[in-house]
Structure formats: C-alpha cells, structure tokens
C-alpha cells in the first residue's frame, strides 16, 4: 500500500524559481523542498537580493522560550498564523506542542485546512454567506476538524445562526471588548447576553470566551498593564458567568483565550487567579514570539520580562529571527549608500529597519554594523543608509537589517530562506499572503 501523503507534501514539491524574490537568478527552478539541500551561502553572495531570511538558531531559541513559559504556567499555545502565513512554520509549531493555529480570515483558515491544520481558532467574525458556507462545509466534511469563530453581539449570533446550514453546530467563542477598542461586546453583561443567545441556538455551540488585549501600547507601560488587567478581569467574570449559568456546549471544556505577543504574561496571571468548577483551558494566541523582531516586539517583550515573576522566567530570552538582506547599489556621495530594498520589502509602519550586519561576498564572515549606521528613509525599492566618515561599504557589499513588526515585513515575501549558524540555506519556506 502506498504511503499516505503528508499535509505538506504537495507544497514541498511545488516549483520555485527566479521569478520569486530572494531566489538566485542564476539557478534553475527547484522543488521548494530541495532548496535547502543546495548549500547556497549568504556569505558567498549566492542568494537573490533582496532576501528575507530566518535564523534557525533564533527560531529554536524562541520556541524553547515559549515551551518553558507554557510548562511553567500550564497554558496552551494557539499561535497566530497571520504573522507568517507559512504552513511549514504552522507544522513546526504544532510538532512542538501547539494546541492549534489562530488565523484571522476565512481565506487564511482555508489555507490552514488545506495544509492539514486540524484545529483553527478564527479570531474574527464570519458575517458573509460564502464564508459561513465554506466553514460549515469544512466542518461537515471532516469530523476531526475543530474550527472556532467569534461572536460579539446578539445580532451577530442571529446572523451566523441564520447562515449556518450544516450537520455540525458552528463552534464559537464570545468576544469581550472595551470602549473605543476594536471588536467585542462592550461590557461583561452585554457579553453574557451574547452567550445566552448562543446557548439558545442549536446551530451554534459555545466553547468559551475571548478578548484581545494587545492594542494597549503607549509610552506609559504601567498604565497599559493596568488597562490590560482590567480587561482580563472582565474576561474572567464573563467566563465565570458562562460556567455558572451552564451556557457552555455540553461536554466541552471552557476555553479562556487572549494573549497576543505583548501581554501573554498578564493573561497567565489573570488565569492563575481564577478557579473554575469544570474543565477549562487557557489558550494564548501569541503570533510574533516565533520570529520576534528588532524593534516593536523587542521593546514590548522587554517590558514583559521586567514584569515576569521569578517562577515564570526562562533561562534565555526571545531573539530576533528575521533579517532582510540587500546589496549596496551605489555610494553616490560621502556618507550615503543606497541599498536595494525598500517599502516593498520591509516594514516601515512603526520603525525603519535597523542595520545589523554586513559582509563582502567571498570575504570574512559578517561583521556587526557600526552604531553610526542608520536607515534614513525608504523609497519603494531603495533604502538610504547614512554612514559615518570612512565607512567601508562599496557597491556589491551586502547589508542585513533587523526589522520592527514582523507582520508587515513577512507579508511582503513569498519565499523565506532559513539560515544556519554558518549562513547557509537549510530550508525554503513558502508564505501565502
């Protein structure tokens, strides 16, 4: 009997060539799964430029950090796949013990289902008939699939129930929000009314409660943490109300979900303060911890680590795994180098990229970029790198930059190249943005 295909088999067999950014222009097309066996070297100048790379050692370190945090807190992880939209990374996280994968849209969820993710938390609301029809059909076609979505109003419950036509009830979480925030019922009592409406609807099945606390990001760290704790206290009260009124779908554990990449410690803290009568599970949805970054999340995680009680501290911190490398195209005047990357290649919504390392292909290993190097501005496909007098850069050299905000860097790439400690390509990863 032939072996059953793995979920990623078709993806790894799909061809990739020089029409894809980052792939070397002088190399023939290859199956995606063969790219990491070619021995291509960043140091040898063998990659197409610009190139987005992931450091294998940093990915391993970041997974170990989260594993230790989960072990110490008893939480489960359902990482937000919208950050990378890379099924290969989804399966890396699932193999490491992730409870499921969070996704943000029906299209993203469909990619997860197609590539074998069996539990998906769709952290959004389904309101369009075609999307509900797809979700219902996916659940009916596969009894092993667990596909949860959100509701935050009685009207939303009525609309979802009116569109649901499948054999299995649609699993939902009630979302709690806050005034001026994004989605979510604006009070605990309003959220309880939503939960009661779900319980009264045979076409829906209430599985738990949810919120998103990650938008509290100001210069006042203490005030931000206080607002997060207030929201999470409300989520705890909502969960207690759902349990006390028996609103949960029969036979299900109560899911208590929050925890983006900035405040998952406070979510674990709120969970620790609650005692539920029946089975319950804390589900964190941190999406950027796998890749981390050199800007926004570096700052936010520094705050997080300052808050951590000793019993939750891991031996090592998170490390930035993403770099975007590009070639020096021109040095048209003293103190200025133009790099071949720009707004189409790197995030610029929060911070500009930060020069981290540079190398001369065929020369010694990469060197740290001196402190005086800085990206001044970006065009579509150029970066203005300001340099102190005497900087050694010349056309053809390569500069690697750290980025701020993984979500708005990775969405610019179809191909990510994983490098080992010697800067050799060991894996190629396809994204689906």
Image (spheres, grey):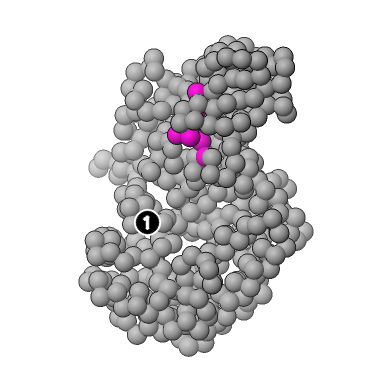
Question: Foreground residue, 27 or 329?
Answer: 329
Residue at far front of view:
333
Q: Which residue is mark 1?
A: 105
Q: Residue at 48%, 34% (x, y): give it.
A: 343
Would you say the magenta stretch is mainly helix, strand or loop? loop
Disc 1 is placed on an element classified as loop
Decide if residue 327 is on the left or right side of residue 364. Answer: left
The part of the chain drawn in magenta is 340-347
Report crowding for label 1: few under 14, some 14 to 19, many 20 or more residues within 10 A (C-alpha): some
Name the image quarter holding residue 23: top left
Residue 350 screen position, x and y as percent: 57, 45
Does the rendering let one see residue 141? no
**Quick one: quadrant of the C terminus?**
top left
Query: Is 73 placed above or below 58 here?
Result: below
Query: Is 59 placed above or below 265 here?
Result: above
Task: Say how many tags the image has.
Answer: 1
Q: Residue at 57%, 32% (x, y): give it.
A: 377
Residue 282 screen position, x and y as percent: 55, 67
Residue 418 screen position, x and y as percent: 51, 32
Q: Residue at 43%, 80% (x, y): give it.
A: 195
Does the rendering let one see residue 158? yes
């Amino acid at each position: 009997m032939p072996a059953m295909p793995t979920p990623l088999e078709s993806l790894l067999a799909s061809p990739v060539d020089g029409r894809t950014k980052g792939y070397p222009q002088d190399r023939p097309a290859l199956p995606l799964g063969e790219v990491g066996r070619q021995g291509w070297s960043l140091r040898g100048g063998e990659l197409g430029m610009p190139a987005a790379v992931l450091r294998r050692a940093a990915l391993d370190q970041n997974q170990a950090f989260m594993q230790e945090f989960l072990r110490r807190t008893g939480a489960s992880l359902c990482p937000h796949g919208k950050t990378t939209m890379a099924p290969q990374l989804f399966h890396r996280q699932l193999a490491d013990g992730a409870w499921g994968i969070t996704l943000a849209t029906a299209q993203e969820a469909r990619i997860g289902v197609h590539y074998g993710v069996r539990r998906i938390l769709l952290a959004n609301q389904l309101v369009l008939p075609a999307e509900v029809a797809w979700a219902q059909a996916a659940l009916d076609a596969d009894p092993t699939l667990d596909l949860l979505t959100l509701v935050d109003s009685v009207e939303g419950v009525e609309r979802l129930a009116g569109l649901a036509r499948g054999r299995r009830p649609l699993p939902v979480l009630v979302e709690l929000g806050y005034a001026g925030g994004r989605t979510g019922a604006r009070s605990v009592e309003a959220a309880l009314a939503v939960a009661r409406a779900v319980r009264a609807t045979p076409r829906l099945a209430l599985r738990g409660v949810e919120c998103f606390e990650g938008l509290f990001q100001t210069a006042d760290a203490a005030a931000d943490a206080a607002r997060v704790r207030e929201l999470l206290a409300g989520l705890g009260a909502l969960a207690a109300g759902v349990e006390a009124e028996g609103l949960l779908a029969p036979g299900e554990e109560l899911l208590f979900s929050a925890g983006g990449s900035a405040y998952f410690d406070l979510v674990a803290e709120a969970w620790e303060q609650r005692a539920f009568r029946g089975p319950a599970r804390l589900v964190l949805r941190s999406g950027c911890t796998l890749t981390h970054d050199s800007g926004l999340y570096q700052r936010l995680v520094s705050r997080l680590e300052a808050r951590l009680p000793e019993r939750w501290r891991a031996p090592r911190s998170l490390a930035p795994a993403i770099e975007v490398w590009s070639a020096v195209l021109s040095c048209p005047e003293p103190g200025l180098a133009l790099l071949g990357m720009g707004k189409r290649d790197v995030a610029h919504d929060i911070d500009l990229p930060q020069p981290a390392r540079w190398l001369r292909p065929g020369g010694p290993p990469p060197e740290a970029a001196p402190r005086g190097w800085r990206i001044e501005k970006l065009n579509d496909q150029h970066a203005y790198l300001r340099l102190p007098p005497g900087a050694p850069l010349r056309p053809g050299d390569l500069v690697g930059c750290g980025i701020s905000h993984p979500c708005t860097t990775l969405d610019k790439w179809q191909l990510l190249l994983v490098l080992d400690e010697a800067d050799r390509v060991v894996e190629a990863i396809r994204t689906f943005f």
